[in-house]
Every structure is written in structure tokens, then in C-alpha cells.
Amino acid sequence: MRDRFREAFKALTSEEGDGFVPFRWQTRLYEQLMEGRLPRAVDLPTGLGKTSVMALWLIALAEGAKLPRRLVYIVDRRAVVDQATRFAEQLRRNMPAYLAQKLQLDADSNRLPISTLRGGFADNRDWLEDPSKPAIIVGTIDMIGSRLLFEGYGVSKRMRPYHAGLLGVDALVLLDEAHLCPPFESLLRQIEAKRDGELGPRKCGNVLTPAFCVMSLSATGREMSNMPSGPVFGLVTRDYEEPLVRERLYANKRLKLTSLTENLNLADALAEKAIALGQGYPPGRVLVYCNSRRDAVEVKRLIDSECSRRRRSGEMKAGHESELLVGERRILERTALDKWLRATGFSGGCKTLPAASAFLIATSAGEVGVDLDADHMVCDLVSYERMVQRLGRVNRRGGAGRTANIVVFESQIAWKASGGKAAIERQERDRKTLLRWSAPLRHLAEGEDGCFDASPAAISEAKRRFPELVDAATTPAPLHPELSRPLLDAWAMTSLEQHEGRPEVAPWLRGWQEEEEPQTILVWRKYLPHVRQGAENKLPRKMAEEYFRCVPVHSSEKLEASSSRVFDWLLKRVNLIGKRGKAHCLAGMGGNIVAIVLDYAGKHLAQAKLNELQQLAASAKSMSKQQQRDRDRRKKEWREQLLPGSVLVLDARIGGLCEGMLDEKSKYEEAPTADADADWRAICEDPWANNSRPLIGFRVVEASCDKRGEGLAGPPLSDGWRPVGTFETDFDDGGRLQRGLVVYKHPEHQVGEDARSIASMPQSLAEHAEQVAARARVFADRLNLPEQEADALVLAARLHDNGKAAERWQNAMNAPKKNRPYAKTEGGGNLRQLEGYRHEFGSLLKAESEEMPVDARDLILHLIAAHHGGARPLISSAGCDEGPPSVLELKAGEAALRFGRMQERYGPWGLAWREAILRAADQIVSRELCSGFGGRRDG
């Protein structure tokens, strides 16, 4: 078994033809997984490849180990999720055919589904396609945690139970750097322990739902007393005998603590020391950490300026390169940064010497989970757990003859015995804090040169010998609430717009954060929806929400920053646009809508014209007292109500970006956008993903009115792109349509739950029902569902779309008159003709008259009612012609009560998982029809 594992591991982890021989600890952990013994935690020193647990899980699963099918890898920092994604992609790219066959992956694609819920990759939804096959999901605490609790950030209400069901069932969660997120680890442990108890089924002891398991990964864990109870996997004595392990554990890192001199501020000192370290022979890769973004930007400016001066004067023979790694940067540019890191040797295990000095200046965004390996490091002093993360990013792999010089500045300002009483007291508090933070470092082994040994082995030894100092220097874990069944039930009622007992999930994910600033996500777009007739320009709420459902925000478009910073930047930017006058591309367009505010779920909150924003930014000198009061009220509304926790979509001509960062003085007038820039798609493409499906799944084209004056004439696009929505934007003074926007979607992308009824070819209702039933049977067999549940699933699949037979639905979707009823129709439809009719409600009414097993009746009816994410608990009876309104409302009420019974029987996650199986069968058949398979491909 060991030989087979060794060969599989080498194949999966191969880079440029060289496979990695597994460490002893990796072999031992693999053997435990094969035996079904999951450790509660894996506690290893940094640099030993904790991420490889993904590969161990994959091989063990292929070899028949009883492990969950989905691996969910979570890392706290949003900026570094994509590195874990790339490792998963490497596993997929290198997967031998025999492993793919054992995992029942498609022979024609040999592709392991991998999805990322943060970073330069959008959620490609691959993980949702087939609940019976393995998948890897990589994401952040916020993105994974909110989905797990039925409150998925950025996920529609209808899709939230689908996501929750697949994350809460048949899933192994790997929580990387678990010591940095105690509240979230506590939440996961509660779900693991209570999902089938207090938080699960209440009335049936025979319900079997696949497991939810948690494994914490940590390199710098808090005290062992705080580690989860149960087996903790770590190194044993023999593991230290491996040469490569010793190289990494005893990597030569010489740490020097120093203070600022009075004539230098922190940015000056960091830049000066970084240049000195980078100018050696050969030139060095220097990592500079700053606690603040402002310092990081200034350090980069100083390094660039001084290195350029030295190059001109001949003091530096080679040039230099520099980059910023900060959280407040658009994901697109951060994706390009990753390529720079690999090219300069900061990541990717580079073995060549740099041709020129390279400087990476980072904030906390570059501390956790980033596979950096710098030659030297300069930084300010921060809390212990953050310092350990920083130290792990320099001389990470060790090796003979390699020594990292590390300089840590203990103070952020030079101490002065002057100033007022408050200033002196603040300095004293800061001084005591810095002494606490530096104490564990001062207890590292000290060399004759006055430098401390900062190798992983020395860090571990100091943690063992001086736990009190380490604890005092570590940021206290935030308080957090317990998870209860009433809360979970409230969150699971996803079809309710409002619920008094449904709080925000943030405290359960991150604890109560007292000083955390609210954040705003910025997005730039070339095309914004509007309705303009003459001088009037407006944006109806429904139009805005429908538009952004068709062209949802792609992850790579996002720039996240504090709401206060965004507001200040926005006012300065529009003020600058006004000062540029006719020279700016927005000159004379003050009446244009240039800003739209959405919540994370896509609900429209507000919009603003350019002149309205400029009024907010205007000087008070030109205003009356009343105008000032009105202006101040509106500013307060934007700063305190509209921007916090929202998405701000801006006209691309607002600009204000420089290298992906906010810069109100930027000379670039128009920002690159995902809806108009072809180069954008090239940067974001994932070469190892399903290449038939582009990551940017929409295209927007500005179109004129057709010759008949009845609609918009969008040009045909190649490669299967088809129009799925039109938005009429510009009318003449007489109300006649002039122009509008046409949205195209790639057939591999879905617009939403209802858009699956629009296909590239029509399909009869009977054919669709049989294909979905057949797919549901395949899923049930692979998942080893009990016979009664499997039969219930298949029957629900056969009946799920019968409500589409209604004449109202057939007419609204432009079904051919001949051979009705159809489940799928070509082109678009007129949803207004439905008058609110939900075909799943019609299907529910028809199913109630069908014969079915009594014990499975409730489950079958609920699966039918919920197959588009409704009936949790509410389902609309509007537009249905099957009876008088009073009777239909009674039936809708019965569906709500049935949801309650099913929630009691299967538990929140168990029910959502069962719903997801039917929904996956329905979706994959619909997708195959659009892709030309006609739903006939074997599953």
C-alpha cells in the first residue's frame, strides 16, 4: 500500500516533471485516513506542506477510504485563497487516469470539480453539479461560513439551501491556520458534534445523512489546552531525521530587534533597511511587512525612488522590481501580482538566483497562507501570532548556505518625552504593548552577534518553554455566541424576506469584533442600467436588480475597502472630475447615473447621478445654511447607512484606480472593466478549468432599436453566446425606444433558477422528466441512499416540472403550439405573462393527486415544491388557475407546514442536502441540453 501511495503522491504533486517524495508524517497521516481515523487537528511547524492534506484525502478516497466526498479548504485571509486553489488545480492536472477512474470522474474530461469562493476566480459552481462525486471547494471564512449557515454572502435566496446542503453534508472541512479564527473553529466543532443531535433530526432515529467532519490545520497554534479535544496529529521523533524536514525546521533565520532613531519615521527606516538587504551579491528578494496600508504604499514609493536614483548614479548596477500585496486592491490586479511573485521567485519554490533586487511590500494580507519564500525580511513589530506568520514567509525552505537576515523595528515612532499628558500616556501604553509583543522574541536563542534564532524549531521551543509570554503577546480570541437550533431554523427559512429571529451571521463566524470597520465592495462597469427620456434619467429598482442578476459581479472585479475610506475617495474623485471640466470624458454628463448601491444579495439600495455626488463634495462656502444641512444629512446617509456592507457599482469613467488601488488623483480616466475589456478575460481565465466555459459568463452589447421599432436588435455572437435579457435604456421625447443593452450568456453559464427553461433547443416535458429521473437514480445509487429515499427522489424527479404544462406557462415561455407541453423552449419568454405563477406550485398541486408511498409522501411533495429553492417555508400561489385563491392559499400553507415537518425529520442540513440532489439532477440535464448533449450522456 505504501508503494502505491508513494507513486500516487509523487504524480499528483509533480512540478515540471519532478514529483515530491512524501514525508514520513504524510505517509502516517495517509494510513490513518485509510483506517477512517480523522485527527481533530494537524499541528505542524510552518514550511512542511500542510496543504498536502488535500492530496492525502484524494488518494485515500480513491483507494476506498470511508471519507467525505467533498473537501472544503478554508483559509482566513481573503487575499490568499487562490494559492490553495492552484494546489488543487495541480492535483487535478497531474491526476493519473487510474485515480480518476477510481473516483468515478468523467472519462472524457478527467476533471476533478474545483471551486473557489474568493480571490481571482469566480465561483464556477462546479462543486454544485454532482453531489455524488468528489469536489474541492476553497474559500474564506466569510464565504464558506455564511453559506453553511444558509445566509450565503452574494448568493440568491433560492440557492442558499443548495449551498448549505452540500457544505453541511458529506464534507471534510480543513481549517487552515485555525489558531487565527477561534470563533469559526468553535462553530465548526458545534456543527460537527451536534448536526445529528441537537441541531439535527428530532423525530426519526432511522435517518442516515453522510458525515460532516472538521480537521484543524495549524503551525503556530495557541496553547495546547485550547486545541480541540481528541487526537492531534503532529511530528514524532523519527520525522525529524529526514534531511528535508531538518532543513526546513532549522532554516537559518537571524532576527535583530531594533528601534527607530529620532531622525527617521517608520516608512523611512523600513525602506532604508530593505534596500540595504536587497543590494547584496547576489541581489536579494526582500519582504517588507507594514501594519498599515498607508505605510506600505509609502515604503514602496521610497524604495522605487531611491533605487532609481542609485541606478542613475551608478551605485546600483542592476535594476530593481517592487510590488504591493495589500488587501485594499482589486482582485484583477492581485491576480497579476501572483504572476509577478512567481516570476521573481518569491513563490513557487524558485531555485534560481534573482537578476535584480526584488521587494515585496505587504500588509496583513500577505501574512497567512501565502506560499512566500523571501531571502530577507524587514518589518514593524506586531502581536505574536502575526509575527510567527511573517517569520514563516522568509527562508521558508532552508538549505545549506542560505541565511535570512530579519530586522524588526520595535517602535512605530521614535519615543519623545514631550507633548501633552494624553500623548505621553498613549506612548506609555504603546510602549508596554510593544514590550509584551517582543518578549517571546527576546527569549529565542541568542547568538554572539546579538541576533536571535528565528527558525521554526527555535520558535516551537520558545513556545514550549515560555507559554505565559507567548499568551501575553497573543491577541485575545474574541467572544462569540453559541449556535442554537432556533437560530438555525430561522436562517434555514430562506424564502422569508424578513424574520425577527434571524440575526446577521458575522458574530458566529468571527466573534464580536469591537473595532472592525465596516467594508464596502467597489466595482467598475462600462454599462449601467438606466431609463433616459429627454432630460430625465432614472433607474427603477426592479430594473437594477434584474440587470445585476443577469450580469452578476465577478470576483475579479471587486475591490474591498473600509466604507469611510471609500466615501472620502469618492467625494475627492468626483470633485477632481468637476475641476477638470471639459477635459474629462464625463464633462457635460452631470445627469448621468454613475453610481449604484446594492446589498450583497443584489438588492437595489440607491443610485446617484454625477451632479448629485458633486453636490455632496461641494464646498460649504457656496451653500445656504439649509443647503448645508441637506448636504450633511445626505452625506451621513451615504457614510453610515448606504455604503457599509454594500456593493458600490461605478461608471468606469469615474476611474480613480492606479495599479488596482484607490487613488483619487489617478490620471487614468476610465477603469478597465469586466463587461467591456477583452484583456480582462485573458487575465482571469483558469487554464485548468473547463475551457468550454469562460469565467466571465456574460457579455453586454449596446444595441439600437430594430427596424420595426418593437425591440432591441442585438448582433449574433459566435461560440454559443445567446441573448438572455434586454434592457431598454434610451427613449426619445415621444417615448419611442432608441437604444438599450443586450445581455448574452454562454450556454455553460446560468442566469438564474428560472433561466434554465430557456434552452438552445426545445424539449418536451415528458422527455425532460424521464431524463431527470434517470439522473436522480444515478445519484441515489452512487450515494447509497436507502431504497425508500431513492425511490422518493426518483418519483419527485419524474413529477417536478408538471406545473409547466399550464397553458399560462407554455404561452409565457413561447412554447411551440405543436406537441405541447414543453419543459424547455428556445429563445426568451415574457415572464410578465406569468403574473407571478410558479410552476413548482402547479407541480405540487398535480402531484398531490398521484399515488405514492404514505411514508415518503411528505418528502416527495416537499422536494417538488422546493426544487427551485422555494417552499422554505413560503411558496407563492399567485397566477395559478387550478382553483379559487382561498383554496390555493390553503395549499401554500400546507406546503409551509410540510417544510416544518421535513425540517424536524431530517434536520436543516439533511433536508437541504436531499433537496440539492434533485436540484442537481435537474440542473445537469438542463445544462447538457443547452450544451448540445440533449441530456442523453451517461452519468
Image: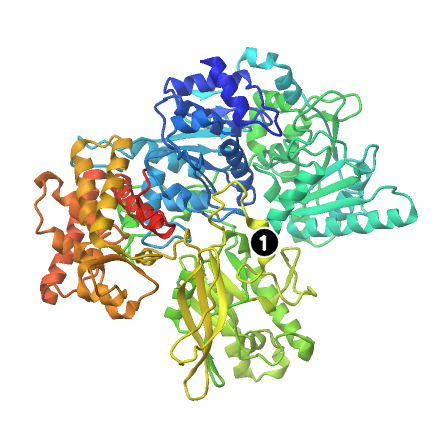
**Residue 62 at x, y = what percent?**
40, 25
- Dividing the picture into quadrants, the one containing residue 247 is top right
Q: How many numbered marks does the figure carry?
A: 1
**Residue 246 at x, y = what percent?**
64, 17
**Residue 178 at x, y = what percent?**
48, 33
Residue 174 showing in the rendered view: yes
**The N terminus is located in which quarter?**
top left
Where 580 falls versus 509 (above or below)? below
Where 676 falls versus 578 (above or below)? above
Where 333 falls versus 571 (above or below)? above
Residue 511 showing in the rendered view: no
**The C terminus is located in which quarter?**
top left
Q: Which residue lies furthest to the right in this view?
A: 313
For the point 84% across and 42% down, the residue is 318
For the point 30% across and 49% down, the residue is 491
- Dividing the picture into quadrants, the one containing residue 857 is top left
For the point 9% across and 67% down, the residue is 884
Scheme of image coloration: rainbow
**Residue 484 at x, y = what percent?**
29, 41
Does residue 533 appear left or right of residue 47 in this picture?
A: left
- Dividing the picture into quadrants, the one containing residue 193 is top left
User: Callout 1: few (<14), some (14-19), or many (20+) C-alpha neighbours within 10 Å?
Assistant: many
Q: Which residue lies furthest to the front in this view?
A: 818
Q: What element carries label 1?
A: loop
| Front position in the image: 736 or 692 | 692
For the point 58% across and 54% down, the residue is 330
Residue that mark 1 sits on: 330
Instruction: Give the residue type that dot 1 points to.
Output: Arg
Does residue 918 appear left or right of residue 56 in this picture?
A: left
